[in-house]
C-alpha cells in the first residue's frame, strides 16, 4: 500500500504550506479555534485528526505501533510540528513492511462498531475519505478566515506532472 504513504506525504506537505500561509495571516492568533459551523470541530481538531489518520493506518497495516496524539495543537507552530512529525514517520516507513492489499484488518470505531475489511478497502474506504474530509475542512476554515489559499495550495505536487511540450 505504497499509495497510502505517497498520497499522505503529498497532502501533508501541501498542508504544511497552507499552515505557513496561515501563520502569516492577521488571524493567526485565533484561527486554531475557528469553525465552519457551530456544530463542527475547530481547526485545531481538524489538524489533529488529519495528522493522526496516516499514523493509524500505518499502525493497522504494519508491525509498527504508532500512538496517535489525542491533544489538539494549541498554536499554528504546534500544528506545523504535528504535521512535520507525521511526515517524518511516513518517510521512515518502508513499503515492504506494509501488509498486502488483500490481507485483512480489523477496525473498531470509538462507538463500538466493528469492521473486518481488506487493507485496500481499509485505506480506500476509511482512511482516505476521513483524511481528505479533515484536510478539506481545515482548508475551508482557513479560507473562511481570509487566508489566501487556492487549489494550487492543495495540490502543489501536481507540478511535477506538468506537460510543457505543448
Image (cartoon, rainbow, N blue to C red):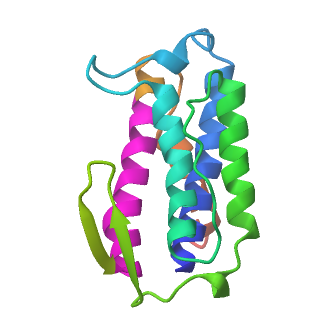
Query: In the visual, does 68 lie left or right of 143?
Result: right
Q: In the rendered image, which quarter is residue 83 located in? A: top right
| Predominant secondary structure, magenta span | helix
Q: Residue furthest front?
A: 112
Measuring from the top left, give residue 53's x and y in whole percent: 49, 54
Measuring from the top left, give residue 114's x and y in whole percent: 26, 65
Number of marks present in the image shown:
0
Query: In the visual, does 27 lie left or right of 109?
Result: right
Q: Bounds of the magenta span?
A: 118-140
Q: Residue drawn 36% across and 46% down? A: 133
Measuring from the top left, give residue 18's x and y in whole percent: 60, 35
State the residue in front, 125 or 158.
Answer: 125
| Quarter the C terminus occupies | bottom right
* In this view, 39 is above or below 101: above
Q: Is residue 129 visible?
A: yes
Q: Is residue 152 visible?
A: no
Query: In the visual, does 40 lie left or right of 143?
Result: left
* In this view, 32 is above or below 139: above
* In this view, 164 is above or below 19: below
State the residue in front, 114 or 94.
Answer: 114
Measuring from the top left, give residue 23's x and y in whole percent: 67, 22
Q: Residue drawn 55% across and 53% down? A: 11
* In this view, 132 is above or below 142: below
State the residue in front, 103 or 80.
Answer: 103
Q: Does the stretch in magenta take in 34?
A: no
Q: Does the stretch in magenta take in 139?
A: yes
Q: Residue drawn 53% across and 16% down? A: 31
Amino acid at each position: 500500500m505504497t499509495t497510502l504513504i505517497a498520497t499522505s506525504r503529498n497532502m501533508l506537505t501541501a498542508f504544511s504550506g497552507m499552515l505557513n500561509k496561515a501563520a502569516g495571516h492577521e488571524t493567526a492568533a485565533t484561527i486554531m479555534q475557528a469553525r465552519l459551523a457551530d456544530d463542527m470541530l475547530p481547526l485545531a481538531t481538524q489538524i489533529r485528526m488529519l495528522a493522526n489518520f496516516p499514523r493509524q493506518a500505518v499502525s493497522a497495516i504494519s508491525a509498527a505501533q504508532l500512538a496517535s496524539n489525542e491533544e489538539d495543537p494549541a498554536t499554528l507552530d504546534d500544528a506545523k510540528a504535528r504535521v512535520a512529525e507525521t511526515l517524518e514517520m511516513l518517510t521512515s516507513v518502508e513499503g515492504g513492511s506494509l501488509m498486502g492489499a488483500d490481507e485483512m484488518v480489523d477496525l473498531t470505531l470509538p462507538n463500538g462498531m466493528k469492521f473486518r475489511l481488506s487493507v485496500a478497502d481499509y485505506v480506500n474506504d476509511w482512511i482516505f475519505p476521513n483524511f481528505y474530509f479533515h484536510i478539506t475542512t481545515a482548508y475551508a476554515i482557513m479560507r473562511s478566515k481570509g487566508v489566501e489559499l487556492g487549489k494550487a495550495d492543495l495540490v502543489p505536487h501536481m507540478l511535477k506532472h506538468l506537460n510543457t511540450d505543448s
